[in-house]
Image: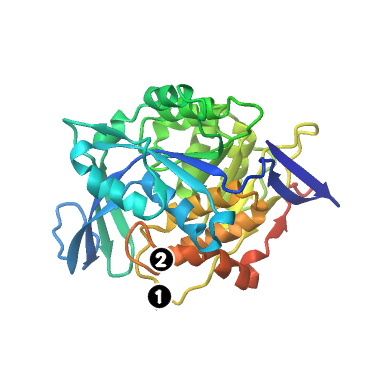
Amino acid sequence: KCQLESGAGHLAAFAIDLPMRAAPKVLVFGSVNIDVVFHACAKLPSPGETVSCASCSRLNGGKGANQAVACATVCGELGDEDGVDVDFVGCLSVKDDAFVLGALVERGVEVSKCQLESGVETGTACVLVDTQAENCIVVSPGANNCLSAEKFIKAMDSRRDAPEYACALFQLETPFDESVAVAERVRRDKNNPCVTFLNFSPAKPELAGAVLACEHIDCLVVNETEAEMLCYYIEDIEEEDENEDDEEDESSYCARRIAKFSDKFVLLTRGAAGSSLHLPPMPVTGEDVVYYMTETLHLNKGHVVDTVGAGDAFVGAFVSSVARNRLITDAMSIASAAGTLACTEPGARPRAIAAAQSRAASVETLCTSTELSTDRKS
């Protein structure tokens, strides 16, 4: 699915070979939560400590649903001709359907394939945000553990006009085996290549081996902590990379090893430092290839309100941009802009990210990607 063009020893472009269509479809198969958010806490509590906050609110959330909204929102400023159709598949309590699904529909997400359950609570997250915009989160999965690949696949197979997805996105707030089954199904049609993405979040070390070995995932999206966790697994079963360079930072080293070990593309998010894309070795020579790094928008500290939605905004923006056949470097730039803009607005589903494409294009340091060779000093 992935095509590389190289020149002068460097990676010149990276593109996903997708069929052109007016509105490509993106599938987001994942979690949906109700978030109870405590705003402007005096500090994030230590064990046994009680802290006060300025206010509390009940909001919609869940990594899967948030990323689906981000997919739809980033394309919202472009008009129908350049947008994407986003199908979200999640599981929730039947008593919460109006509150949860209504909010998704209002943001342009298709929810007809969602699964409703009785006798189980919708997933719930407790989110604490301090006065410096840092956060900590505790999640009760609830109905997310009931999300069924079988129900989704059976519904797809029963339709003659089953949707053909350009991209499919998964996370780890729902059972991984269910995601794998769906990924396998949407990649089955060789005439309609579907690119699959897994956001390794929330990080689950017990799934590291299965995730790295899964042949139905094309691209892993990880932050620096998640990259280190996957790399620890690799180092437990494989000798240290003899090509390690003292000039390579720890996160880049981890991402490169993950790409090499798993034969997957690895998109590494670096917070305020932007993001980098790491590719598996070239199939013929086995040599490491270059990777791209893109910077992020620069905000004054006073403009940062809340970092809760930054990661999901980045992932959703990246996947929707890839689905629209954007150059991968452009997709990274738009995603970095979305992640930064998400910090200017409270909550997990910021509307400010609708301006990600125009802001990315207007900031030279953001939309210019730097070629960095991972060839060792030899």
Is residue 250 among what the camera can see? no
Name the side, left or right, on which 142 lies relative to 349. Answer: left
Most foreground residue, 20 or 206:
20
Query: Relative to 22, does residue 115 appear above or below in the rendering?
Result: above
Most foreground residue, 330 or 285:
330
Q: Residue at x 19, y 33 (%)?
A: 120
Name the side, left or right, on which 373 lies relative to 182. Answer: right
- The residue type indicated by label 1 comes to His
Furthest residue in direction front, as rendered: 160
- Quarter of the image with the N terminus in it: top right
Q: Residue at x 39, y 44 (%)?
A: 64
* Separation (CA) of disc 2 from disc 1: 8 Å
Name the side, left or right, on which 128 lies relative to 329. Answer: left
Q: How is the image coloured?
A: rainbow
Mark 2 and mark 1 residues within 8 Å of each other at the beta carbon: yes
Say few, some or many: other residues with alpha carbon within 10 Å of mark 1 (under 14 / 14 to 19 / 20 or more): few
- The residue type indicated by label 2 comes to Cys
Mark identifier at residue 303: 1
Residue 344 lies in quadrant: bottom left
Mark identifier at residue 183: none
Q: Position of residue 48 (x, y in %)?
A: 14, 52
Q: Which residue is mark 2?
A: 343
Residue 46 lies in quadrant: bottom left
User: Is label 2 in a helix, a strand or a loop?
Assistant: loop
